[in-house]
């Protein structure tokens, strides 16, 4: 019997999150079973069922998290901006002060 | 009008009213839901222009990959451009699901029939422009894009999470370039100030004319969250002090925050000029579209090979 993976939307407009799977002869029954297993307590706003055979997986970490230094793609790489700005701000304020004194 | 037609029309009016009430109460809509034609049309127009802007926005920066001043900057800039093109991919997909085929959107873009953001119709003249764009243009974009996180159309709102996160990195990258130039030699400082002077007008036009909220259909359908003028006020509030504290000046003598109202005053941009630019009359419009057309035509063999048919 085909297996269907179940995805559940737990907030209106939110992402569909993998909840588990059900075994069913067709999609209509799979939805019934999914509802019975995964939304007995008003858990879901929407349910999706997808035949497991329709899902393809990638697990190669060399592809998903390529080796090498990619920190420049992250916000924290630019954390030094805060200190850079603070120093520059002090310098600009000093220069403005010196101009006012002159 | 036959009774059947009248009944069908009455039904649509009723469904539209219920849909409108759902949206106005903060409800969201999924791709598989029924939606009124006007809502779908507005979504497609809005989302298509956003996708066009992401892909056209990669072009002015692309010119600077080979001219970036260091390997670090080259990596940062290349990553940003890759992100922008990636955003176009995500957003075109959402528009496609709404019913407009991608080849039609590309044909309309290179044929000058659909629009892309005014800010991408200008040339980039120096490395200072790259900093100004990545800091301030992306800064302005983040303000309007974060409003889209609450868009009534959920598939669009969901992909905006990723896009906003990546835009925040671009902003840091641009801020770093600007801080480096502003703290550099007199020549570097002058280069940055000249770039800011060039980009100020497009930045002030960025969020569009101050259309009264009640006349803005995209607001009424909750496609976007904030009126244009609110976004411009937020932009000025956040970035003018940040510019001034690092020694940059705002090239508008009228630009000041009114202490009493707490509102920013500024020289009113020429909104007819904005309309002309948006319609392809900007200083770099024809060059940019010609380049996009060339890439599209030169890539035709690949699309044919991948799709197995004439693309």
Image (cartoon, rainbow, N blue to C red):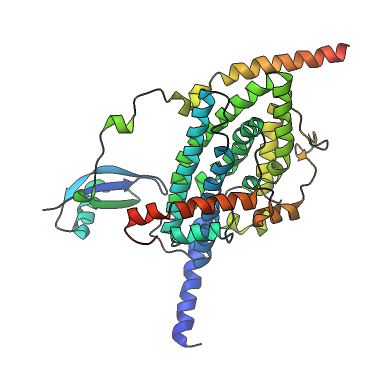
Asked whether residue A11 appears in the rendered view, the answer is yes
Residue sitting at 54 percent across and 38 percent down? B62
Look at the picture and state if B170 lies above or below B53.
above
**Where's residue B97, x and y in %?**
41, 58
Quadrant of the rendering where the C terminus of chain B is positioned: bottom left
Quarter occupied by residue B181: top right
Who is closer to the viewer here, B58 or A41? B58
Look at the picture and state if B72 lies above or below A98.
below
Look at the picture and state if A95 lies above or below B92.
above
Relative horizontal placement of residue B130, taking residue A94 as reference (left or right): left
**Where's residue B241, x and y in %?**
71, 28
Residue sitting at 33 percent across and 52 percent down? A46
Who is closer to the viewer here, B14 or B188? B188
Total tally of numbered discs in the picture: 0
**Where's residue B90, x and y in %?**
44, 47
Asked whether residue A41 appears in the rendered view, the answer is no
**Where's residue B256, x and y in %?**
79, 34
Most extreme residue toward the right, as rendered? A102
Quarter occupied by residue B145: top right
Relative horizontal placement of residue B100, taking residue B121 as reference (left or right): left
């Amino acid at each position: 019997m085909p297996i269907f993976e179940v995805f559940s939307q737990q907030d209106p407009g939110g992402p569909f999150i993998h909840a588990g799977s059900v075994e069913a002869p067709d999609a209509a029954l799979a939805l019934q079973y999914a509802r019975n297993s995964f939304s007995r307590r008003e858990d879901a706003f929407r349910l999706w069922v997808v035949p497991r055979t329709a899902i393809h997986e990638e697990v190669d970490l060399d592809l998903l998290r390529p080796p090498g230094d990619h920190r420049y793609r992250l916000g924290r790489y630019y954390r030094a901006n805060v200190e850079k700005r603070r120093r520059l701000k002090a310098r600009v304020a000093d220069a403005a002060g010196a101009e006012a004194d002159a | 009008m036959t009774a059947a037609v009248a009944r069908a029309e009455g039904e649509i009016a009723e469904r539209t009213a219920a849909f409108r009430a759902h949206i106005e109460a903060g409800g969201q809509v999924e791709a598989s839901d029924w939606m009124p034609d006007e809502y779908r049309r507005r979504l497609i127009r809005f989302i298509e222009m956003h996708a066009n802007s992401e892909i056209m926005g990669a072009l002015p920066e692309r010119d600077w990959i080979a001219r970036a001043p260091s390997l670090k900057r080259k990596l940062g800039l290349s990553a940003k451009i890759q992100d922008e093109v990636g955003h176009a991919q995500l957003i075109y997909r959402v528009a496609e699901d709404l019913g407009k085929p991608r080849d039609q959107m590309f044909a309309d873009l290179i044929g000058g029939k659909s629009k892309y953001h005014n800010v991408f119709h200008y040339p980039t003249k120096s490395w200072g422009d790259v900093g100004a764009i990545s800091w301030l243009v992306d800064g302005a974009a983040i303000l309007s894009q974060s409003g889209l996180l609450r868009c009534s159309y959920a598939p669009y709102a969901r992909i905006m999470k990723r896009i906003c996160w990546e835009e925040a990195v671009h902003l840091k990258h641009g801020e770093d370039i600007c801080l480096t130039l502003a703290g550099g030699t007199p020549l570097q400082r002058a280069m940055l100030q000249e770039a800011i002077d060039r980009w100020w007008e497009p930045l002030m036009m960025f969020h569009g004319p101050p259309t009264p909220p009640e006349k803005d259909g995209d607001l009424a359908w909750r496609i976007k969250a904030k009126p244009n003028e609110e976004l411009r006020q937020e932009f000025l509030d956040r970035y003018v002090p940040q510019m001034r504290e690092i020694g940059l000046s705002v090239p508008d003598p009228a630009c000041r925050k009114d202490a009493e109202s707490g509102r920013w005053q500024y020289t009113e941009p020429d909104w007819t000029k904005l309309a002309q630019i948006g319609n392809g009359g900007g200083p770099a419009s024809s060059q940019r579209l010609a380049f996009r057309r060339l890439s599209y035509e030169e890539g035709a063999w690949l699309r044919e090979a991948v799709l197995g048919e004439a693309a």
